[in-house]
Image (cartoon, rainbow, N blue to C red):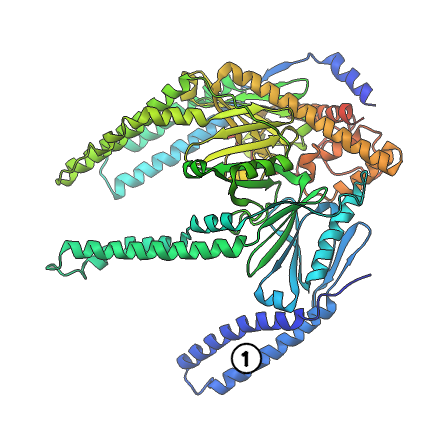
Amino acid sequence: MSRRLAPLSVPYRIAERGSQLAFGLLVVLVSGGNAVGPYVVGPLLAVGIVGGFVLLLAAYETAYYRRFEYELTADTLDIRSGVVARREREIPYQRVQNVDIRRNAIQRVLGIAAVSFETAGGSQTEAKLRFVSFDEAKRLQSEIGRHKRRAAPEEGEEAGAEAELLFSLSPRELAIVGALSFDLRLPGAVFVLVSSSTPFLSTFVPDGFGMEVAVLGALGVVVAVALFSWLVGVAVAVLNYYDFRLSRTRDELQYERGLVRRFDGSIPLEKIQTLTIRDNPLKRVFGYATLFIETAGYAPGQGQSRGSEAAVPLARRDRVLALANDIEPFGEVSFERPPRRVRRRYVARYLIVLGVVTAAAFGLSAASGRPFPWYGPLVLVPAVPVAAHLKWRHRGYWLGPDHVVTRNGVLRRETKVVPYDRVQTVIDTRSPFQRRWRLATVTADTAGSLSIVNQDAAAVDVDEERADDLRAELAERTRVAVARRREQRLERRREALGVAATDVRVDREAGQNDAASSDGEASRSGPGPNGELSSESGPGADGEASREPESSPDSDGEASREPESDPE
Amino acid sequence: MSDDLHAVDRADEPRVTSRRLDPRVQIVWAARTFVVAVVLGVAVFGLSRVLVSLPPWAPAATTVGVALVGVAYTVARYRLWTYEIRDDALYLERGVLTRVRTVVPFVRLQHVDSSRGPIERTLGLASVVVYTAGSRGADVTVPGLTPEGADDLRERLKRLAIRAEGEDAV
């Protein structure tokens, strides 16, 4: 049965688009009218034109509403839309990774919500419903979750259907999140403004005017800006994270948050690649930490907006650890530290940095003709061994039964938990400096999306020989874990469906052929289509390059990628 | 089916084959450094004309110097580049300054392409690109193969990926 959007979406869309359009038009017409002369476009005519546009818009939006249909079929979400150019889309449930619901204040009053369907492989939203009633949005979210489960049925179908609350942000934690938030946009703007106009501004300061006044004034501006951006930060944090709660159904995490705008999202547990626990010295002292959940391809709120919506912004450390353990049961971690000689390496490194800074200061002091205490940075020399020791102390890695856990950083310490079956490749790098100390860095690359900007889980500065072992061990554990997981999945499906294995394969293939190239589905089950091949590959066997074990050595994958053949 | 594959693979392959690239890949790499050298030379020439006065031989010296360093680097790079097809994984070792060793478990292979750039084509060389879902996936390129060698490697990797999968899934 196909459905329509909520009727209230028509007036809302008209108002939304209309207000933007009308404002733009008014500006153009009025200013344009002044330029061309009042004879050409009078205010009356302007209003008339705008009115015409609004009418047109109303007609368009009504048509949009009337021609927009969606339907939940057995295995796809079908959307038919478009006023002039028609568009029909069928999105297989398998491909839908997240169903996000957003409502702003007005939409909440009207009881409508925007639903967006995110798929793996790219940050782009696959489809949007603007708008359906909030109940319908929730229904869609749970229905799609249910359909996805049905595609991979397991024991106790309905048992895990209702959500279990994993975590909710306490008011106290929200207050701290707010208090620690700064909105950096204003200081940034002010900084750019001031730095670009300093020579200009300085002409305004009269010569007789004391330096003190100027400094005081500048200080006042700085304090005001800081205060303002802090207040904005508080407001933004409270608006975003008010009543944050994270719950789990059997195979999804669901989050809700926001004071005025409510966000409801879901993250399939299957797509989770890495958990990152981040803290800093201050948070450590008071026993707080932040948790990020990385998924393949799309992470809610990543990329466009700042911060991760699925992340726990701040909570008591024990609660964060408990939550992380709920999501990925990695158990008690006992880190193995790098060899002690690493500390000497860090001492050398910091001393070199200090030396360079001091030399630069000396050069500046000599060149400027106005000598200043260039040896200032040397005050930090006693702190060097301490810093080196701390750096060493906070580094570590641990190979658990099912997870590799790494920890790095002092000022921004990150503990990363990666299940073995999410590791994609293992990379061992040794810089010339590391080679001098017989050290290496072993990185476990995942398909996580944060990893492109952030660091992957890495055991930094481990002993060379240990690195050799670690590399082999990680690759082997990955292989075993992937195999085990795949076997379990196949087994479950076979049991649940009560059919022969070959049928399951064909079924799976149908679902997976749609999946985009390097998406989460493939990443979690390894080279997707290959598994099916080991049987006498059934019908519909096309696609990936890894087809045909024996035959046709020529050119199937040949032309598909252009030669980006620069390895470095 | 998968048993057949095992038999074939294990019969005619040693367990670990460590391989080097075709020496002609050095020409490809050297050609790239020459391009860089010429560009830098031109840049120095432009600089000497517009901004600072440099000795007239500076552009030529830059080009020659960079080219020499490039050649030395290329040779070192070739010497250090090896790859192995192991039982469960593709293993690459490379890098002159920073040594990089990459392990790509066969279960993680998404697909394998062979590609031929313009310089490679004129020399009759090809590369194999191995894709995983990892964020650094496309990093894994094996350059400096003959076209037959590239096809061969691609086919072997495919077969090994299938074997890895077959073993585990069934």
- Pick the residue in front: A264 or A48: A264
Mark yes or no: residue A91 visible. Answer: no
Left or right, A378 with respect to A236, comes to left
- Pick the residue in front: A327 or B158: A327
Spot occupied by residue A201 in the image (x, y as percentages of width and height): 22, 59
Q: Quadrant of residue A82?
A: bottom right
Residue underneath mark 1: A50
Tell me if residue B40 comes above or below residue A236 in the rendering.
above
Query: In the image as oriented, which residue stretches furthest toward the left?
Result: A208
Left or right, A288 with respect to B127, comes to left
Spot occupied by residue A30 in the image (x, y as percentages of width and height): 44, 79
Q: Residue at x 15, y 54 (%)?
A: A211
Q: Residue at x 44, y 23 (%)?
A: A431
Badge 1 marks a residue whose secondary structure is helix
Mark yes or no: residue A235 visible. Answer: yes
Spot occupied by residue B10 in the image (x, y as percentages of width and height): 74, 14
Q: Residue at x 23, y 40 (%)?
A: B52
Q: Residue at x 56, y 56 (%)?
A: A258
Q: Amino acid at mark 1?
A: Val
- Pick the residue in front: A37 or A273: A273
Q: Quadrant of residue A380?
A: top left
Tell me if residue A387 comes above or below residue A146 in the rendering.
above
Left or right, A263 with respect to A7, comes to left
Report crowding for label 1: few under 14, some 14 to 19, many 20 or more residues within 10 A (C-alpha).
many
The answer for which chain carries disc 1 is A
